């Protein structure tokens, strides 16, 4: 169920250049169904900035009622959010959207998780859930440059991890597709989150593989009411459009027109 | 009788609070959060004769204490709205105000004729003020004669009272209001959004794919309030006021300026519980003002 709650900031730290990891505590965590869902955050109690900010969930800990999100402090909203300190409250609406279908992968499967930049965080909870059920994840994580790389060690603990940077300052040089092209091991499906050009490239690379893509779009309400975040669909599906916030943000490969 | 209940043409409202058209879809999303029967009414998303897929994205952009939108009247079309959305809404004890839009007069007339037969549609809201479609919409709402002609044509076929939604993008909003009143409008809803623009400072290009969008949110409240105040002096039909309402104090201001009821728009995106919250806070505010009934607020500014 979707709830609105003033959640308590447990911890906030900058884990890479302008990349913040914030842990929040509250009952809302009990409603979280799985990886790939997001929360809609009101960064200020005033009208400035007015709208909520959609931020993906990076990890969920239902035992102690906490979840972690990782975001880039870039615009007005996220810059204000980055100023919040432990003990302060944040207005959270969530959990929203439909996440990655963990049930699609079976014990013993090898799967590929591809993340680009600030699209990497939801893959962390996903990987944890997959490992729990005996699935072997291979992580391919792309970043602009070394100083914005985060969670390398966390992903390594869960499985094979390839870091790739556009300028080659850490790991491989190039794009996630560079690494994917050289990947020798076969896999049963892929899960990906990142910028649309990256999602498109991956979908085109594996036309015959089962895949799940998490999209991002400018949102209003986050609930499906305002029709701000619609995407056109392909001929494979019956509906003419989908809403990223409430029908997604995760869609099977081939659904969204890219 | 409840101290919040309001009687308007076609509408017996439990309270004067309703979500504004375009900010609430057809209610399904918010029904997951609270009981829609709490609402005074629901103004459903604009309905056109045919299915509309709307404008390209980005469709929204945040601005100082507000937002711009150019959704482009996306909706499933008259047939589906009647057969699916309105039927689904029948489970709630809440009158529906159907927002009617189109390209040509004939479109408005056809939508009005059919949708007004739905049993939970108790009034129509004639959308002559959408700034985000190339044809129709605002072109009907900026010329008093054309607005009157359309109002009369819709009145002739509608089985329920017709409220006309006015555009703020005019020189003299009072003139349009008087004109639609003379043409038979049963009420006025105001205001629709103000045409605006936001540029990407780096590229110099508009952020919204449509170029311009409609400005809403707390930023527009002073403009909306002034227009309600103006129109209330010039017409005798009731006004449903809207434009940046986010708090119970905003509701009191709009009713004081002359509105008989109000609609909450953009604030639903910020706080999805804003309508029930305001409804809950209203009685206490009436006590604070020493008023018995919410209708005593209407027109206080003019007395």
Image (cartoon, coloured by chain):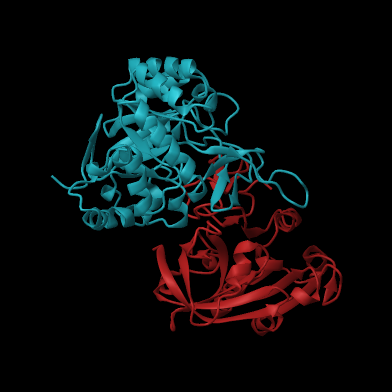
Chain colours: A red, B cyan
Q: How many marks?
A: 0
In the picture, which quadrant includes the N terminus of chain A? bottom left
The quadrant holding residue A240 is top right
Residue B240 appears left or right of A105: left
**Residue at the image point whose x is 52% and y is 67% from the top:** A103
- Pinpoint residue B301: horizontal percent, then vertical percent: 33, 41
Q: Is residue B145 above or below residue B53?
A: above
Residue B89 visible in image: yes
- Farthest-out residue, front: B303
- Which percent across, then down, holds residue B154? 38, 19
Where residue B64 appears, as percent x and y from the top left, is: 58, 53
* Image point (64%, 50%), residue name: A254
A9 or A33, which is in the foreground?
Answer: A9
Q: Closer to the camera, B300 or A234?
A: B300
Question: Residue drawn 22% across and 44% down?
Answer: B14
Q: Quadrant of residue A212?
A: bottom right
Please give left or right for residue A205 compared with residue A19 in the image. Answer: right
Judge whether A63 appears above or below B150 on screen.
below
Q: Position of residue B183 (x, y in %)?
A: 37, 16
Q: Residue furthest left?
A: B1
Q: Is residue B70 visible?
A: no
Q: Is residue B123 above or below residue A65?
A: above
Occupied quadrant, residue B185 = top left
- Closer-to-camera residue (B120/B255): B255
């Amino acid at each position: 169920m979707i709830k609105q709650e003033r959640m308590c900031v447990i911890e906030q730290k900058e884990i890479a250049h302008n990349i913040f990891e914030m842990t929040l505590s509250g009952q809302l965590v009990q409603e979280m169904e799985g990886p790939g869902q997001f929360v809609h955050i009101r960064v200020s109690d005033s009208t400035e900035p007015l709208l909520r900010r959609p931020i993906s969930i990076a990890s969920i800990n239902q035992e102690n009622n906490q979840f972690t999100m990782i975001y880039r402090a870039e615009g007005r909203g996220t810059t204000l959010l980055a100023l919040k300190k432990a003990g302060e409250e944040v207005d959270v609406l969530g959990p929203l959207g439909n996440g990655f279908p963990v049930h699609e992968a079976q014990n013993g499967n090898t799967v590929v998780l591809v993340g680009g930049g600030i699209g990497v965080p939801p893959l962390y909870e996903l990987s944890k859930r997959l490992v729990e059920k005996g699935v072997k994840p291979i992580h391919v994580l792309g970043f602009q440059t070394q100083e914005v790389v985060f969670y390398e060690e966390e992903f390594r603990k869960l499985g094979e991890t390839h870091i790739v940077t556009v300028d080659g300052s850490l790991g491989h040089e190039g794009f996630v597709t560079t690494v994917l092209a050289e990947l020798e091991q076969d896999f049963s499906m892929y899960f990906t989150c990142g910028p649309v050009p990256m999602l498109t490239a991956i979908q085109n690379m594996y036309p015959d593989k089962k895949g799940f893509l998490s999209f991002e779009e400018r949102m209003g309400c986050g609930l499906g009411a305002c029709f701000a975040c619609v995407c056109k669909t392909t001929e494979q599906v019956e509906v003419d459009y989908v809403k990223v916030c409430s029908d997604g943000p995760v869609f099977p490969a081939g659904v969204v027109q890219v | 009788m409840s101290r919040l209940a309001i009687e308007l043409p076609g509408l017996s409202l439990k309270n004067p609070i309703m979500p504004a058209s375009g900010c609430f879809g057809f209610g399904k999303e918010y029904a997951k959060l609270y009981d829609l029967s709490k609402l005074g009414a629901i103004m459903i998303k604009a309905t056109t004769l045919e299915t509309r897929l709307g404008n390209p994205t980005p469709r929204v952009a945040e601005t100082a204490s507000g937002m711009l939108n150019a959704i482009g009247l996306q909706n499933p079309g008259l047939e589906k709205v009647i057969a699916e959305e309105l039927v689904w809404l029948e489970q709630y004890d809440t009158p529906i105000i159907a927002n009617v839009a189109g390209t040509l007069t004939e479109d408005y007339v056809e939508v009005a004729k059919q949708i007004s037969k739905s049993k939970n549609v108790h009034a129509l809201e004639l959308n002559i003020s959408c700034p985000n479609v190339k044809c129709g919409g605002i072109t009907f709402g900026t010329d008093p004669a054309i607005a009157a002609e359309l109002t009369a044509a819709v009145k002739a076929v509608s089985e329920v009272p017709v409220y006309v939604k006015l555009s703020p993008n005019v020189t003299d909003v009072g003139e349009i209001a008087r004109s639609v009143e003379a043409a038979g409008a049963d009420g006025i809803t105001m205001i629709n959004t103000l045409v605006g623009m936001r540029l990407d400072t780096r590229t110099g290009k508009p952020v919204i794919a449509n170029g311009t969008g409609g400005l809403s949110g707390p930023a527009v409240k002073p403009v909306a309030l002034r227009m309600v105040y103006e129109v209330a002096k010039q017409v005798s039909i009731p006004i449903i006021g809207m434009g940046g309402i986010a708090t119970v104090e905003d509701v009191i201001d709009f009713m004081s300026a002359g509105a008989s009821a109000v609609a909450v728009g953009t604030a639903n995106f910020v706080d999805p519980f804003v309508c029930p919250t305001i409804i809950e806070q209203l009685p206490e505010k009436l006590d604070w003002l020493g008023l018995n009934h919410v209708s005593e607020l209407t027109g206080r500014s003019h007395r």
